[in-house]
Amino acid sequence: MSLELNSKYRYKGLHNWTSREVVSLHRNIETQEIEFYRHSAMKSFFLRIDNKWYLAIIPHHVYTSDGKTIYPYSEDLLSGIKRMELPSAVFGQTIMWKHKLTFIPRKTFYDSDLKEEPLISFGDLLRLTSERGLDDKSWRKEDITIEEDLDTWGLF
């Protein structure tokens, strides 16, 4: 499989429609050969708290050589992008995944009266603010395990 184009996903943000590059092709600067693809990905799981179900969404990136095979240097690329991403970028990805999981597009102009419901719905996304935080530099790399099995990540 050889993906050639970058892919954008258009979605409703907090206030306006926006888009995000969800698959991007990266070429070697010298040879112009395809080096890797970066995919927006997510891991999710349901939590039951006080007899209510919540979906935890963990935005992520997966790097592949051909759209399927994990790129050999994906750990280095992942640690680099995680260092550069701001909390607002991660929140934006969460909003994108919320839209992807719930939005049902109209197929034609005449579909406006259809009452199709998504399989899952969300209330407002939870936001946490705190006067205290964790020093990211105090976390040791060996304390964190990252599972890189493509079957466990939802990829674009």
Image: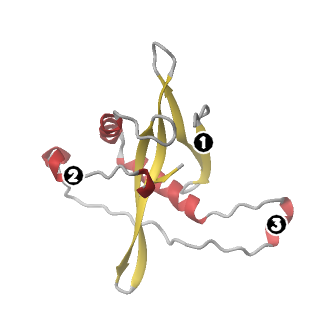
For the residues labelled 3 and 1, the Cα–Cα distance comes to 24 Å
Q: Residues within 10 Å of mark 1 (few under 14, many from 20)?
A: some
Name the residue: 46% across, 56% down.
94
Residue 97: percent from left, percent from top: 51, 57
Are the two marked residues, 3 and 1, in contact with CB atoms closer than 8 angstroms? no
Residue 66: percent from left, percent from top: 51, 36
Figure colour scheme: secondary structure
Q: Amino acid at mark 3?
A: Asp
> Mark 2 or 3 closer to N-term?
3
Residue 121: percent from left, percent from top: 55, 72
Say which residue label 1 marks: 8
Residue 85: percent from left, percent from top: 36, 41
- Can residue 10 be spotted in the picture? yes
Say which residue label 3 marks: 111
Q: Amino acid at mark 2?
A: Ile
- Can residue 92 be spotted in the picture? no
Are the two marked residues, 2 and 3, in contact with CB atoms closer than 8 angstroms? no
Decide if residue 102 is on the left or right side of residue 51. right
> Mark 1 or 2 closer to N-term?
1
Decide if residue 75 is on the left or right side of residue 69. left
Q: Residues within 10 Å of mark 2 (few under 14, many from 20)?
A: few
Name the residue: 31% across, 39% down.
75
Image quarter in which the N terminus is found = top right
Q: Amino acid at mark 1?
A: Lys
Disc sitting over residue 144 in the figure: 2
